[in-house]
Image (spheres, helix red, strand yellow):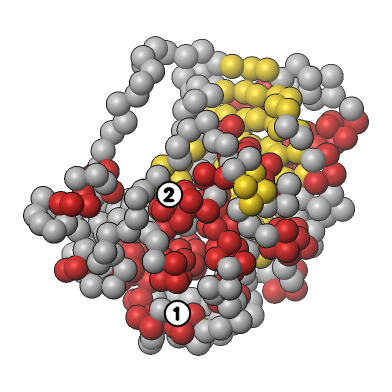
Amino acid sequence: MSTGPHPARYRGAPREQPSLENWQEPPHNRWTFAHLGEIVPSAVVSRRAPHPTGAVSRLNRLAPGLPDLEARLEQSYTDAFLVLRGDEVVAEFYRDGFAPHDRHLVMSVSKSLCGLVFGSVVDEERIDPAQRIVQYIPELAGSVYDGPVVQELLDMVIQVDYSEDYVDPASEVQTHDRAGGWRPRRAGDPADDYAFLASLRGDGTVGRFQYSSAHTDVLAWLIERVTGERYVTALSERLWSKLGADRDATITVDPTGFGFANGGVSCTARDLARVGRLVLDGGIGPGGRAVSQEWIDATFAGGDPAVMDDHFPGGFENGSYTRQWWCMGNERGNISAIGIHGQNLWLDPRTDSAIVKLSTWPEPDTDEWHRVHSRLLLDVCLELEAW
């Protein structure tokens, strides 16, 4: 856990922040020498010997009703699969070469983690979701975020000139990746994620759903602004430390150390299931309350299906989106955190179960892959219900 923010971290002026150019110089070195991985790409030197691992398959309790489950997991490029019912792991699968202690990139499941952290800040009345975004971040004046209120950001109903086409080099999501350190920089790119967010424009329309990874990073910026904590620190103190996690999570950071809240978290399947357990338990984990019961109840209640476009994954006709979670609108009351290339944290209140599926689909985001996942996850829920 970080000991606290760099004193000049959140003023929006890159010259005041540690960077590759100045991290070895005072006063920045007082902070960077203890946080070098947030400035210079770093590799983990594991305490475990790097022996090859074989596949792990403990699916026997689900096998009577789902005899083809392992084949379906393999066919959908599964790296890790875990079913946590109550406090009991009832099924687990890891592909050959991927171990239970290995972290996996969870992509946009990271958004739902941010939603929980944001809820904790709202609970403390540091942010009013009914207030305008620029009231808290005046640096966004003149951007698409100059006018909308915070709740519209949470529910992604702000229309923005932002293409989420992951394979189009001209898309805004790829520019966002470059600003966040995920792709090689190009001439003219924003200096960092803060600058990228301030550059976004739109027609000012609100009230229709538009999925945009930029919205989540603005939420993280809001968290930083009102708490004085780096987003990385807030994620640790307000969520991860509450889980009883086996391992630290990681999050990628931009050149200023700003955590890539929209998609940069990596963790184990077991620890991600613990996030699901915390949500099912009304916001309380072994380390204490992370977020209020009221925030959790509002998340399970879902958003407004009438504002949705055709982006909803998995073909749920009454699906909605709120507080950075996908809400299926089905009779089971399922909600899910979803990431491209097949990442899922699926919650089933009816059986008190959290299902984790971490994958590496060959395509980032297709209707058919989402339907494959939804069918599998619902079939697992039905089998659990039959016990």
Element class at badge 1: helix
In this view of the protein, can residue 94 be seen by the observer?
A: yes
Element class at badge 2: loop
Q: Which residue in the protein does label 2 denote?
A: 264
Name the residue at 18% across, 64% down.
Answer: 187
Q: Which quarter of the figure has residue 154?
A: bottom right
What percent of the width, then of the height, locates residue 151? Answer: 60, 75
N-terminal label among 2 and 1: 1
In this view of the protein, can residue 157 be seen by the observer?
A: no
Assess disc 1: are there few (<14), some (14-19) or many (≥20) residues with their C-alpha within 10 Å of its C-alpha: some
Viewer-proximal residue, 193 or 11?
A: 11
User: Position of 144 compared to 196: left or right?
Assistant: right
What percent of the width, then of the height, locates residue 347? Answer: 72, 45
Residue 244 lies, with reference to residue 188, above or below; the image says: above
Look at label 1 and name its amino acid: Tyr
Look at label 2 and name its amino acid: Gly
Viewer-proximal residue, 221 or 287?
A: 287
Name the residue at 54% across, 58% down.
Answer: 117
Residue 274 lies, with reference to residue 65, above or below; the image says: below
Q: Quadrant of the N terminus?
A: top left
Residue 16 lies, with reference to residue 88, above or below; the image says: below
Q: Quadrant of the C terminus?
A: top right
What percent of the width, then of the height, locates residue 221? Answer: 42, 67
What percent of the width, then of the height, locates residue 252? Answer: 36, 48
Which mark is drawn over residue 274? none
Q: Which residue in the protein does label 1 denote?
A: 136
Looking at the rendered structure, the number of numbered marks drawn on it comes to 2
Q: Which quarter of the figure has residue 51?
A: top left
Q: How far is mark 2 from mark 1, CA to CA?
A: 24 Å
User: Position of 1 compared to 344: left or right?
Assistant: left
Assess disc 2: are there few (<14), some (14-19) or many (≥20) residues with their C-alpha within 10 Å of its C-alpha: many
